[in-house]
Image (cartoon, rainbow, N blue to C red):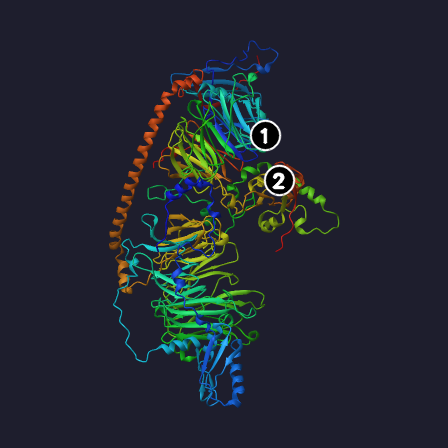
Amino acid sequence: MAIDTVSMEDIIASASRLGINLNDVNLDSISLPSAQDFGIKSDDEDLNEEDSLEFEGGFGNIIVVDNLPVVPREKFEKLEGVVRKIYSQIGVIKDDGLWMPVDPATQKTLGYCFIEYNTPQEGELAKEKTNGYKLDRAHIFAVNMFDEIEKFMKVPDEWAPPETKPYTPGENLQHWLTDEKARDQFVIRAGSDTEVLWNDARQLKADPVYKRNFWTESYVQWSPLGTYLATVHRQGAAVWGGASTFNRLMRYAHPQVKLIDFSPGEKYLVTYSSHEPSNPRDTHKVVLNIFDVRTGKIMRDFKGSADDFAIGGSGGFAGVSWPVFRWGGGKDDKYFARMGKNVISVYETETFTLIDKKSIKVENVMDFSWSPTDPIFALFVPELGGGNQPARVSLIQIPGKEELRQKNLFSVSDCKMYWQSNGDYLAVKVDRYTKTKKSTYTGFELFRIKERDIPIEVLELENKNDKIIAFAWEPKGHRFAVIHGDNPRPDISFYSMRSGTNTGRVSKLTTLKGKQANALFWSPGGRFIILAGLKGLNGQLEFYNVDDLETMATAEHFMATDIEWDPTGRYVATAVTSVHEMENGFNIWSFHGKLLYRIMKDHFFQFLWRPRPPSFLSPEKEEEIAKNLKKYSKKYEAEDQDVSLLLSEQEREKRKKLKEEWEMWVSQWKKWHDEEKMERQKLRDGEASDEEEEYEAKEVEVEELLEVTEEVLSSDYGQE
Amino acid sequence: MRPILMKGHERPLTFLKYNRDGDLLFSCAKDHTPTVWFADNGERLGTYRGHNGAVWCCDVSRDSKRLITASADQTAKLWDVQKGAELFTFKFDSPAKSVDLGVGDKLVVITTDPFMGLPSAIHVKRISGDPSEQSDESVLTIKGPQGRINRAVWGPLNRTIISAGEDAVVRIWDSETGKLLLESDKETGHKKTITSLAKSSDGSHFLTGSLDKSAKLWDIRSLELIKTYKTERPVNAVTLSPVLDHVVLGGGQDASSVTTTDHRAGKFEAKFYHKILEEEIGGVKGHFGPINALAFNPDGKSFSSGGEDGYVRLHHFDQDYFNIRI
Amino acid sequence: MAITMVANPSNQAAKPRWADVDDDNDDYLLPPRKVIGPDANGIKKVIEYKLNHENKLVRVSKTYRVRKFVTNARKHVVERRAWRKFGDAVDEDVGVRLTMTSVEDVFLDRHMPYGSKGEEPKKSQSSQNEEGSGVLQVCRNCGRKGDHWTARCPYKDLNQPNESFPDTSDVTSVKDVKKGAYVPPSRRGGEKSKGSDMRRGTEENSVRVTNLSEDTREADLNELCSTFGPVTRTYVSNDQRTGTCRGFGFVNFVNRADAEKAIKVLNGYGYDNLILHVEWAAPRTK
């Protein structure tokens, strides 16, 4: 973009010419006249330009319904009535909006009609809902948008093979993983800047990669394997990536998009927007699009009212809890599902349609959750009929829809499901009413997924009445941590799914009492955990080693709001976001709790580590490396030492220079001081110079008491 | 080290000053009574009663016989250090903010705040050896720039006066003619109110502290900016070590964060910086509120800090302090 | 071992010589004080006589080592040390409450985040709290929970003179209760609300102070009120934009009796040129 730029010097020159004191000019009070951009293009303008206008020709609200019965005049009204009835249910047909053309020759209907709605959305909805509708056996509606007909007309009769574009190799999007110093990247948003930086722990600083002002309009998000950075704008979403910098790779048009979600394998991107309805009493309209990330093609869209999508759990945005579609089946992105009223709709990504063309009916389903690795999900149905029908948790396998395991639970008030990262275990936290129904106590149902018949184990805390504040599985491990208790300083207990010799029973490892913590953050590789006190506890951090069951360090990041481990588990970032007015910024710590560096940034919104794809090493190779760690670490240690020596060398140079400069000042000052000495003395009426003073050489005698003895004299005194 | 805590003042401290020999410490506070303490053990020697408003600043003569104080009650008073007797009162039309005795203790520079339409001003008065002959006459009056002048001090040989204040600009005036000689550069200078100013022991350079969370070191003759020290808090008080290359900064909280209570009781610290390298060496914690006053003993072996909490904390350094290598 | 500095070593104080003393006064007929030395090693011996309670004669021999050295005490400094106290310090003796040495050791917290060697900055009190596993640290002095034990109370310096208060005020509050009227437990006199009841107690011992001056801060209010008794919490409402006080604040006392006394004394008290208005705070809705 060529922008007409003027240098600062020119501005100063012009100002002085005009007699304006630049310092008096309040730049903030200057406002550009609206609707003029002075030729300065905004970054998103090209996004604007290519929006497919739905109002071309103003016929966007019209649909064409084909395959209507051909009827004679007498049946006109009846047919019209039937058609009108069907289509009025979907939207409001404009006045005179229904037109059934008649063949002038036969005086019979031509077999199709036009229907005009007030908004294109209604037309689209009508097309979707009625396309394929069976009026009767012989007549199945074929509905299209009026504008599309035109498009179809343009299709040439001859099929010409498409031209093959020459192959341009794309950039290596995974280039960041090959960093020699094995650093990780993270993105931060502060003020209007979005910046991607390297975490350089050796040099104790953050190395910038790319920075952009107004890169996103609301927030940014990494794709799950770290390949892309997604930004959200008014016109849709975009993803950025590249070898050494961030170029825009693809755009996805979705006006007024609010939320986005990637599939775990980064193949698809789901975008969501919510719109005000034309009739204020209706619910919001919701639009969801699923794009193919690489090509930008819309694979499937979902439109409907917010009610259809807002089921279960707590209402999120305008009644919808995000993400609406939950992906299952691990990194293959094979299935995605959403919960509806009494159904769970599971779609597969081959055809983007429901498996077996229908949803799974589950009466009163409240919540469901996929395993992170396998195509299995767990669902929860609450208690019904005042206890007549107990609550239940079921495990369903896709695509077969077999119920792998089921457990009935009694007196349940609420339930939450937690999967372990490898899909090995599922913990279901169950809140139960006590016999008096006045209070609840909590227990855990622990499912061992990978074992035969999926055995379930029940775990109750020692103090059953303790409230559960937090629960977290150890990633890739067999342990979990629970924060429980009612005090301002709750207890933290660690359990393992294996116990001593018996791998089939859960066992407690330890309980830490009276901790100032309300949140748990495991390292992504397991073994280490941060026990954090956020919000009211003002950022207390405890770095705990679960293997050795001991605290490595305690620290504090005053007013911290977010804590995030880097994908390797070597470093932790704690941040204070703009929820608070002051102390915005972030700290980087080593995994054992040493503060490496901190950066303050006002109006701090987001801190996100760039995720890494899973390692390509086989488990055996990983074990081998762990065993021979010493060999590998020697090489890196030597490198580290070199860097630190280099640092000192640079530091030393800098310091020497500063000291020399200073010496020059000091000698200059001393010279002047000496020259002025006589003057000073005069001012003081000849009083002695600065340093001399009257010292009294005093001879002082000091007595040190060594010993005291008292002796009673026997002779009776007083007789003289 | 074990600091000695002196709670002689009911209100926040405003200024601290050691006498030349370093055996007496004078403290000024928003209560109306400047106090003098023995600087070795913190024992209170006496108080100077007579002011009717907050006492902002003081200076003591070289022979430790005369004390001069500036107060919000629109006067500056001259005292007999030993007896506590009030010798003379200089009356002004607005609160007096800062005092500094020149070389020879014959001249004093006093600044007054803007008040009721009157601009801020710098007054030079003569101090006579015999208090009975003391007159109220000004030798020189400079009507100042906008805003308060928080500190004004003498330059070498009493030839110049250096002033700094609310408008963030440091100015050097000719003490004979009252003409403005030099001004600090707006680009490189402070960006917010300058709260404090301290001269080096030989008077060749001086340090200014400002609410813009930084302190700056200047050459006193040329007003060249030599060093800048950055902190995370607004700076209320500064001082320089007379023997080592250290500067000390003390400060407080943003006004905007006053409502969010800082739960770190006792964590307001006096921050030590390396004068040449501009790097933070460390901090001495202990005050329960922002630090408003700092002073180094001329022998360099101890320093004291005065806080919003009304306490004066007197610190005698351990040997460790003198062994710091950077 | 006591060290005494003797300014005039050569002067032997004139002791009453037994021959000069009145013969009638037998009490004074003690043998004279004898000084032996100092010898070559500087050892001096002083022999004195006195009568013990049985009226028996006792010989007291003290052995001193005497050292002479030259000090560089500047003349004026030494002179000033001998000055008499003036102003508010008159009638004060050395070591009065105003000046005290802190019990805690403070040191220059080094922080070296940039790769060069330095000591690890010691963690503050919060880390020490972790060792107090599960036990709530309660300080008897200021009633502040969780932070520190009594011995480490940062407010302990302020509390010395106040021990007498709770007793006197309790007596008065008992008298205030009318005969026969129902007094809710929180208002009954004689109840000390320290210890476990503190959490609930402090909510109710809340005092509202209005007509505060602009530059009043929490620390000022704390100082003002802590003379009546330990204060758990002070809050001063401030204007976000200007940072000045909005004119009112709240103080939570540990003891209700102290709060009462504070109200009695401070209501109408002139503080920073404004007359304070102090009353019980309206109970907060739960």
Q: Which mark is residue C228?
A: 2
Label placed on residue A27? none
Looking at the image, which residue sits at the far right? C180
Task: Farthest residue to the front: give it.
Answer: A105
User: In the rendered image of this protein, does residue A5 appear above or below residue A673?
Assistant: below
Amino acid type assigned to the residue bearing label 1 in the image? Asp
Which residue in the structure is indicated by mark 1?
B73
Element marked by disc 1: loop
Q: Position of residue A415 (x, y in %)?
A: 49, 68
**SS class, disc 2:** loop
Callout 1 environment at 10 Å: few (<14), some (14 to 19), or many (20+)? Answer: some
Quadrant of res A670: top left
| Whole-number angstrom distance, CA of label 2 to CA of label 1 | 30 Å
- Rate crowding at label 2 as few (under 14), some (14 to 19) or many (20 or more) other CA atoms within 10 Å: many
Q: Is residue C213 above or below residue C10?
A: below
Q: Quadrant of residue C114?
A: top left
Q: Residue at coordinates 32% horizontally, 80% vertically from top-left? A: A157
Q: Nearer the viewer, residue A667 or C54?
A: A667
Reply above or below: A84 against B279: below
- The answer to whether residue A61 is above or below residue A624 is below
**Mark 2 residue type:** Phe
Which quadrant is the N terminus of chain B positioned in? top left
Pointers 2 and 1 within a single chain = no
* Nearer the camera: disc 2 or disc 1: 1
What residue occupies the far top of the structure in this picture? C20
| Along the line of sight, the residue nearer the viewer: C156 or A391 | A391
Q: Which chain contains the residue that carries disc 2?
A: C
Measured as percent of width and height from the top left, residue A282 is found at 55, 71
Q: Measuring from the top left, give residue C94's x and y in whole percent.
A: 54, 27
Q: Foreground: B159 or A498?
A: B159
Q: In this orientation, does residue A636 appear?
A: yes
